[in-house]
Amino acid sequence: MKTVGYAAQSSESPLAPFNFVRRVLRSNDVAMEVLYCGVCHSDLHTAHNDWGWTTYPIVPGHEIVGRVTAIGSDVTRYKLGDTVAVGCMVDSCQTCDQCHKGEEQLCREGNTGTYCGLDRITQEPTQGGYSKHLVVREEFVLRVPETLDLAKVAPLLCAGITTYSPLRTWNVVPGSRVGVIGLGGLGHMAVKLAAGMGAKVTVLSRSKDKTADALALGAEQLLVSADIDAMDKAQSSFDLIIDTVPVKHDLNPYVPLLDVDGTLVIVGQVGPMEEQNTVSMLLGRRRIAGSPIGGIRETQEMLDFCAQKNILPDCEMIHMDQINEAFERMERSDVRYRFVIDMASLPVPDTLVV
Ligand SMILES: [Zn+2]
Ligand SMILES: [Zn+2]
């Protein structure tokens, strides 16, 4: 299937229109027209090859909402016209212990990324959702509940599940004391989801500037991390802290905020961190952990939870040709809180037979 998308041709080049081919439908495949695609920090890092593993050309995008346009002969869960979604992975081995548990994101062979991965059958590079069409095996397609506003669903597929999964893994229940460091795409979802689970949520921020936003998103308070007195008073007062900061930073001020057996979970920064003093970890039996996205089953559970509680990200809708400007604004943290591309804005060339 011929299609069109936006791709980077090198780490220096901006994203630009790109014609390419999606694979021929396999018996277990679902083909979709992409309606909306969220813009994740990983898209920007991958386009710029910040992590050193990008292959070019690269079509980013792994927060995808679409409509089913064709199904393979063995597909049973979806039919033409269904509203569906795809997140950060499109395949896994399906046979290891983690896949059997529904934790495909932790597949022993490594999951297949929606972009910058290799198709497990043909070894062709996978390309993401900044494109008109997508073909994905049925097991990695999610169902979008009908009551959700489609234009805002896309960021749930990465920012949503990345914050939902640790909240579930560390058993957040009504009354749990949850801290959220950073109030960007991930952080604002962490606040909404934790509040939706009945937790008492505190946003940790460098200044008071975001207090009104934090409260509006569902937090009970904002704790200024530069305020030494306030940080001292808040020692041992959290069960869980979700750290969404996407750059190298110092965890030493935050670990003492955890109560005994409390956990600080890193979901943002991928790479080295500042040197960690272990005293507060040992003396308080506190933990530092990391968490990636979630499995397919949990991602569906998250979508259904968001439908039930009417939780959606705050989005800024953009056109496809505004993507390079959006990347620049994201680097300045100038977005509230997630860009979503309206894929109807991507023109389809006359030469393209769909
Ligand atoms: Zn992402
Ligand atoms: Zn596996």
Image (spheres, rainbow, N blue to C red):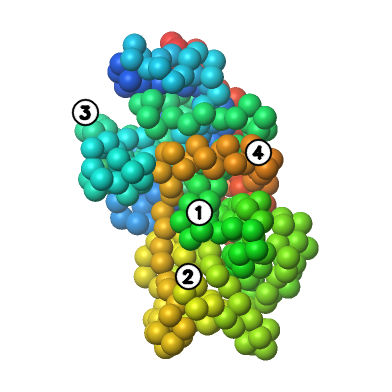
Q: Secondary structure at mark 4?
A: helix
Mark earlier in primary sequence (4, 2) = 2
Question: Is residue 203 visible in the rendered structure shown here?
Answer: no
Say if 16 sits above or below 351 in the image: below
Residue type pointed to by label 4:
Gln
The answer to whether mark 4 and mark 2 are in CB contact below 8 A is no
* Disc 3 target residue: 122
Which residue is depicted at the point 63% across and 71% down?
204
Mark earlier in primary sequence (1, 3) = 3
Residue type pointed to by label 1:
Arg
Residue nearer the viewer, 280 or 245: 280
* Disc 1 target residue: 168
The answer to whether mark 1 and mark 2 are in CB contact below 8 A is no
Q: Secondary structure at mark 2?
A: strand
Mark earlier in primary sequence (1, 2) = 1
Residue 328: give x, y in percent of width and height: 56, 53
Say if 284 sits above or below 327 in the image: below
Which residue is depicted at the point 54% across and 36% down?
37
Query: Mark 1 and mark 3: span between their CA atoms?
Result: 36 Å
Say if 71 sits above or below 220 in the image: above
Question: Is residue 50 visible in the rendered structure shown here?
Answer: yes
* Disc 4 target residue: 308
* Disc 2 target residue: 263
